[in-house]
Image (cartoon, rainbow, N blue to C red):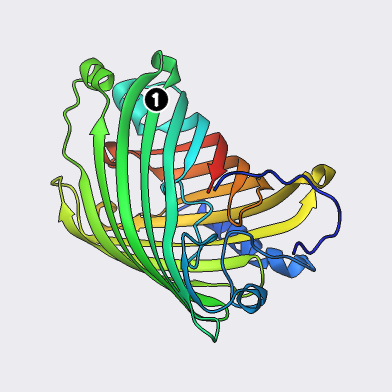
Amino acid sequence: MPRNPRRRLVLRCPGPGWWPSLAALTVLVCAAPLLAQEASSDSTIRSDSAAAEDPSGWDIGPPGQVYPLYLADPRRPQTNAGVLHVLSSDLNDEFGNGHVRTTLSLGGRVPVVRYTGSGGQAWEFSVEGAFFGFFDASQSLESIGWDGWYGFLFSWRFARSWSTKLHYRHLSSHLGDEFIERTGRDRIGYTREDFTLGVAWEPLPGATVYGEGGVGIHDGAGRQEAGYFQFGAQYRDDDPILWDIFDWQVGTDFQLFQEDDYRPGFTVQGALVVPMARQGQQFRLALEYHNGRVLIGELSEFSEDYLALIFAWDF
């Protein structure tokens, strides 16, 4: 049941210089729930009212997620299209790429089976997959490259506000033929398989703090190394705004790779969302800022920062 009794639109669908500012932003994201009197998350399963309404037992293809999605993670499997304005980029300096790009991502994470215990604990097995494509609008939509991703994860909600996951991921990266022909850049064979262990804490309804670490078990390119860390904070408010239609969410995400000497990259995203009838599904209009390594694995040795407008369907 929504908290707010106001009428709203429901769509039915089948089925070192920047660190001080960044630290302040992270504190702001974590403190956002303290400024809101009522909030709850549509995309994460919790063990309070949801557990009270749903009987214990097995559920095939359940709605929502036991372990939360990282809202500001630009590499999580998702379905969206975006327009990027590149503020600065090593690709522009090295290969003559332009400042306007388009992106297309197809995919998502799908819970397969969930078991809910009588005490509210829950176990879940999920699968995920995605295609990430990057195109240079300044070069007649030249294909810069694309990455393919699939993964499996076991999630466990072991306490009222705590959940954890064990995650296997496989990523294979490729360069576009047009980019290769124009620049002469050869593919380095970037392929990453890793296992990660993550934990998420919901200190207040709608607010999530998370962290995870991983180790690569197969590296395809000589520059790759095993270590990987990720952490972040996010907040979701489902008290509708703007004609009682839109919820809103904000998050910040940090990623550190051993192959980059653990140099941190970060992404910040704020979004207006229109929830659908099924829990966890929504349309999303997001504004995103990224500063760090290029998101294509084949070109991840280079850095850039961009501002993006993203249209997404989360399911």
> Residue 25: x percent and y percent?
61, 57
Q: Residue at x 41, y 47 (%)?
A: 75
* Above or below, 292 relative to 57: above
> Residue 105: x percent and y percent?
43, 37
Residue type at tag 1: Phe
Q: Is residue 277 left or right of residue 122?
A: right
Counting labels gives: 1
The extreme top residue here reads: 140
Q: Which residue is mark 1?
A: 135
Q: Is residue 95 left or right of residue 20?
A: left
Can residue 225 be seen by looking at this rendering?
Answer: yes
> Residue 260: x percent and y percent?
28, 52
Residue 204 location, quadrant: bottom right
Residue 104 location, quadrant: top left
* Above or below, 159 relative to 291: below
Q: Residue at x 60, y 76 (%)?
A: 51
Depth check: give the residue in front, 122 or 258: 122
Depth check: give the residue in front, 27 or 78: 78
Q: Is residue 240 left or right of residue 266?
A: right
Q: Quadrant of the N terminus?
A: bottom right
User: Is label 1 in a helix, a strand or a loop?
Assistant: strand
Q: Residue at x 57, y 45 (%)?
A: 14
Neighbour tally class for label 1: few under 14, some 14-19, many 20 plus, Cα within 10 Å: many
